[in-house]
Structure formats: C-alpha cells, structure tokens
C-alpha cells in the first residue's frame, strides 16, 4: 500500500534543466510525490523522500516567511513533520488496521 504523504504544488513540473526538450514534462503538478511511504507485508515500511536536505539540521532551524506576509516565524514545522514521519516509519503509529476476514461461499453474493 502506498501513502503519498506530501505532494508538489499544482504549478510544479519535472524536467532536466541542463537539456532542452520540446516534449511535455512527464510529471506535472500534484502528481509528483515529494514524500511517500510504502507499507509492505507484515510491519515492513519504506520511507521515500525526494531530498536528503530535508533531513539536515539547516532545515530544522530555518526561519520561514510567507511570500504574501511580512510576518517571520523563528521555526518552521519541518522538525515536527519529520518527527511524525519517522514515527510512521518505525511503526509507532499505525498506518493500516487489520480486520478478520471470513470466507464466502461461491455465488453467495449476487454480481453487481
């Protein structure tokens, strides 16, 4: 099971800036996952990030400011986001819930 945790903004596109291409970009807008978690069998979870900078100390302590506002915030929510993301990866937080399954007899449910 795949869980897209953080998606790119709608105006984002993926392209190689070093080459000129006449073709349309392959990934556009919110179809680009920036942070994803894959939940495999058992308790196996894979955390996928688009950037190693996301885990750096510089990002943890950086100030943020909205483009449309002059208010500066001393700390972004980046550290809290990664803390919760890490909890998800190390199975401290449940991603799925198992329910008991019972077998059905063949032809016991009418087709839609």
Image (spheres, rainbow, N blue to C red):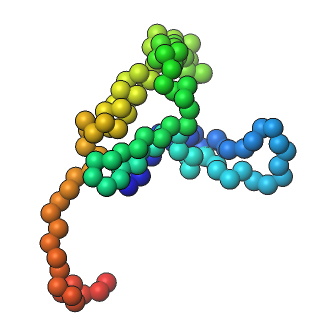
Percent coordinates x, y for residue 38 in the rendering:
40, 49
Q: Kindly identify the residue that appears in the image at 37 percent across and 24 percent down.
A: 80
Q: Kindly identify the residue that appears in the image at 28 percent across and 47 percent down.
A: 43
Residue 54 relative to residue 104: left or right = right
Q: Is residue 53 above or below residue 36?
A: above
Residue 89 relative to residue 52: left or right = left
Residue 99 relative to residue 66: left or right = left
Instruction: Determine the image quadrant of residue 79.
Output: top left
Foreground: 78 or 1?
1
Residue 29 relative to residue 72: left or right = right
Q: How many marks?
A: 0
Percent coordinates x, y for residue 29 in the rendering:
61, 46
Q: Kindly identify the residue that appears in the image at 25 percent across and 43 percent down.
A: 94
Foreground: 67 or 45?
45
Q: Kindly identify the residue that appears in the image at 33 percent across and 47 percent down.
A: 44
State the quadrant of the C terminus.
bottom left
Instruction: Determine the image quadrant of residue 41.
Output: bottom left
Instruction: Determine the image quadrant of residue 69.
Output: top right
Q: In this view, does 105 lie above or below 2?
A: below
Q: Is residue 10 above or below residue 98?
A: above
Asked if residue 63 shows in the view, the reply is yes
Percent coordinates x, y for residue 1 in the rendering:
38, 55
Asked if residue 5 shows in the view, the reply is no
Percent coordinates x, y for residue 31 in the rendering:
56, 50
């Amino acid at each position: 099971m795949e869980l897209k945790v953080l998606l790119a903004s709608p105006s984002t596109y993926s392209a190689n800036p070093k080459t000129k291409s006449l073709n349309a970009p392959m990934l556009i807008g919110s179809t680009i996952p920036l942070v994803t978690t894959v939940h495999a069998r058992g308790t196996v979870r894979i955390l996928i990030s688009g950037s190693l900078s996301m885990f750096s100390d510089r990002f943890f302590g950086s100030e943020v400011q909205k483009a449309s506002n002059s208010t500066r915030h001393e700390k972004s929510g980046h550290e809290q986001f990664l803390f919760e993301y890490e909890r998800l990866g190390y199975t401290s937080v449940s991603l799925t819930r198992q329910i008991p399954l019972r077998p059905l007899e063949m032809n016991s449910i009418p087709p839609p």
